[in-house]
Image (cartoon, helix red, strand yellow):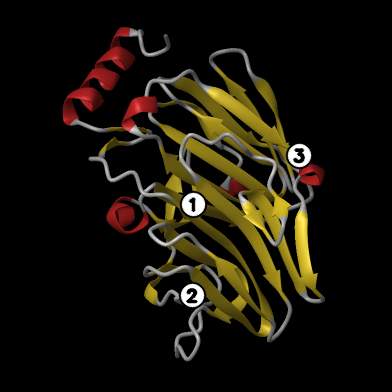
Amino acid sequence: MTRQRAVKRVQRSLPTTEGAGVHLYRAFGHSETSLLDPFLMLDHFRSSDPREYMDGFPMHPHRGIETVTYLLSGEIDHQDSIGNKGQIAAGDVQWMTAGRGIHHQEMPRRTDDPLHGFQLWVNLPRAHKMMSPRYRDIKGDQIPSAKPEDGVEVKVVAGTFDGVHGPVKDLVTRVEYFDVRLSADKDLTFPVRDGDSAFAYVFEGSGHFEEGGRHEVGDRELAIFSQGDEVWTKAGRRGCRFLFAHGEPLHEPIAWGGPIVMNSREELDLAFEELGRGTFIR
């Protein structure tokens, strides 16, 4: 018998700035690591004012994590310290595994479209913190959608829904990641492995995420789920679009300093010492 997950917490994303002054909304971060392991952070950037994002994210380091950039609108140029270079366009996903260390930059282009997208951080397990960096650059037309009925669409970035498999495979940390669009009053149930951490982040319209629940989760709000093996949702009168993700917790200690996430304070201190000595990239 299936057990529907309850909504454990609903919280609103908070405005902040990152990089060289990019205005964005943080859905979760340091405070939620115990609730959302292996997910570390979700940032939502959405602006039609180039002054709020054109300075971008100049060259900066990462170690011990994966960063998942999903762009809905606009364009971002990418470059790193090991020779990779490219562009993230509307609909594209870049899944970067920082592993033992990389410097990279993400610089928005000036276009007629607003900049709108997300960056999700996924933790790497201790055994893979120091793996070689790698990229998965996924174009929008490579991301399939499940459409089980009219008014329901699930873009499958990673994982499987309704027999549709996402293009991002062979992940170190087992996570599934979806972009869900529901027309007004449509409902949907996601199977979720019991034990996984799971969240939904609404960025258009609103919806309920628990049968009989009173709280309607609206634009820029995050729902964190309790345990169970399915998540139910129903869109409000204006429809609903949200990110839905779940993943297997690592249950490992976290030592987090800015763009670097390790398992101990000693490992974190060593990473910053290597940055200072110029030996961070191996």
SS type, badge 3? loop
Q: Which residue is mark 3?
A: 139
Q: Any mark on residue 204, and which?
A: none
On screen, residue 280 versus residue 22, left or right, reads: left
Count of number-bearing discs = 3
Mark 1 vs 2, N-terminal side: 2
Considering every residue shown, the one lying at the far front of the view is: 1
- Amino acid marked by disc 2: Thr
At x 41%, y 77%, the residue is 6
Of 107 and 219, the residue lying toward us? 219
Q: Which residue is mark 2?
A: 2
On screen, residue 55 versus residue 109, left or right, reads: left
- Amino acid marked by disc 3: Lys
Of 238 and 58, the residue lying toward us? 238
Mark 3 vs 1, N-terminal side: 1
SS type, badge 1? strand
Q: Which residue is mark 1?
A: 43
